[in-house]
Image (cartoon, coloured by chain):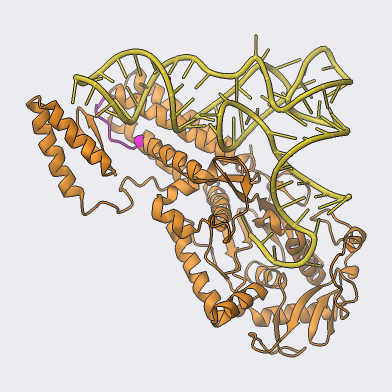
Amino acid sequence: MSIHIYNTLTRKVDPFVTIEPGVVRMYVCGVTPYDDAHVGHAMSAIVFDVIRRYLEYRGYQVRHIVNFTDVDDKVIARAEQLGRDALQLSGQLADEFLAQLAALNVQPATAYPRVTQTIPEIVAFIAGLIANGHAYAAEGDVYFRVASDANYGKLSGRSLGEMLSGTRFEVDPRKESPADFALWKAARPGEPAWPSPWGPGRPGWHIECSAMSVKHLGEQIDIHGGGNDLIFPHHENEIAQSEGLTGKPFARYWVHNGMLQLVNPQTREVEKMSKSLGNVVTVANFLEQYDPDVFRLIVLGSYYRNPLTYNAEIAADNARKHERLLSALRPAVGDSASGPAVETLTQAVEHARASFTQAMDNDFNSAGAVAALFEVVRATNTARDAGVGGQPFAAAQATFKELAGVLGLRLNLDRHGKGQDSAPFIELLIEMRAELRKAKQFALADLVRSRLADLGVTLEDSPQGTRFKL
RNA sequence: GGCGACGUAGCAAAGUGGUAAUGCAACGGUCUGCAAAACCGUCACUCGUGGGUUCGAUUCCCACCGUCGCCUCCA
């Protein structure tokens, strides 16, 4: 079995074959940093992080580029609202997002190019399109001539005629056709601008991705990714630009993740994340409350192409899932290294690895892969109860950590730094309680336990002693 | 209006032309002084509704209902 990927371009699951054997060139549209990143942005980053990690697990070298569109209408509008410098604002937000991605255990991309660092390449790209007739300058703007591209619409399944008939907005008189889109926008007073052959201005949306992709990955790439809201017009226009310039097919596989949607736990209604509703969940909000693995589990729990349901209840459920995964990492209590229980464990782990790979090969079915992980959890816990230990037990746990790692789960037993200061005091109370239990003073012992529970500390007794959870 | 996607147990969510993974929750049991955790067991005769194709459909086709995304702001 080999890897198969759903390709938006062909609308089916295609076998994955790279341009260069063993190497994957993957470009993923990043964010426009104009406000705090929310969980939807994090979802997309995690989806492609998992894809990248799995491709690496399967032996590919992955060149992974993620851009920041750090100058555009929204950035400028937001900066104006805040009375701040646009580039300073977007630069800061981009840096913050990078820090959050690191916290979410997203592997750093090979590069994170920004529009502001790619202006010469963008200008050259546009000049090339003008030279070969795919673009034209008009009063300081430059537009892409959609009519020059016979294949326009192939990604989103639209015909030019359809699009024109659906036009409901005012047509810019400088455009030859309403469907034409801006490659370069003439500077307006107060806006960031760079010199160009058409006068000072800034890149339009879309062109930066084409230019960055060529700059960092070459004219043809294997995977181009992003949210499915980008299929049209963004990715359609990227194809038009890139193929207009090079005359070669741009990306082999177009991979799009579904949108995260908030679902009201009471009404089951889908809600739009919006500031006015006060329901925006930023990445920072989430990380204040939960381990980064918990968010990843939410994302992994469903097929990346489908809409992802999110709410506080789901976050709490996944926190419990996370606890259960961690249970597999508790140390062995016995040291039996042979016998039927060991056989059963070893076979279960092998089976799980096969299920894991089969699921992930099938268009990155991470939910199936996580189910395989839970198979290992049960097998490991059962084996521990049966007294299995030593090398076979360690091997099972090592495989478990390895597969979890392919999905980007850290499974960190340290309670994300929280409670480090209180640990010695909790240990002291546990010790006192142990003495009370020894003296059969159960009422007092239980009081200690329940008072600690009120404070958010859960005690779990075992023959090996008492463990606490925050 | 056009294009596209989705509708599976209380919740979340995989999956297959031959009668439904997994996790959370719930319930029963083992363990425990009691709990918790772990383990064992139970939990969808059914996969939005109605037709059709088929020996057989949740899986293919059509219609309808519902939800969502895109149609130049959007991960």
Task: List the single residue furthest toward the left.
Answer: A439
- Residue depicted at 46% across the width and 41% down the height: A318
Image quadrant holding the C terminus of chain A, namely: top left
Residue A284: % across, % down: 45, 60
Q: Does the magenta stretch include residue A329?
A: yes
Residue A90: % across, % down: 55, 75
Query: Can you see residue A108?
Result: yes
Q: Quadrant of residue A137?
A: bottom right
* Residue A327 versus residue A179 in the image, above or below: above
Output the letter for the chain in yellow.
B
* Residue A403 versus residue A386 in the image, above or below: below
Judging depth in this view, the residue of A3 and A375 nearest the camera is A375
- Residue depicted at 46% across the width and 38% down the height: A317
Q: In this view, does A355 lie to the left or right of A115?
A: left
Judging depth in this view, the residue of A58 and A201 nearest the camera is A201
Query: Can you see residue A408?
Result: no
Q: Is residue A27 magenta?
A: no
Q: Give the range drawn in magenta.
A: A327-337
Image quadrant holding the N terminus of chain A, namely: top right
Residue A367: % across, % down: 56, 38
* Residue B75 versus residue A389 in the image, above or below: below
Judging depth in this view, the residue of A267 and A313 nearest the camera is A267
Give the total of numbered labels. Answer: 0
Q: In which quarter of the image is residue A382?
A: top left
Q: In this view, does A268 lie to the left or right of A467?
A: right
Judging depth in this view, the residue of A31 and A196 nearest the camera is A31
Main secondary structure found in the magenta portion:
loop
- Residue depicted at 47% across the width and 44% down the height: A315
Output the letter for the chain in orange.
A
Residue A69: % across, % down: 62, 71
- Residue depicted at 76% across the width and 59% down the height: A232
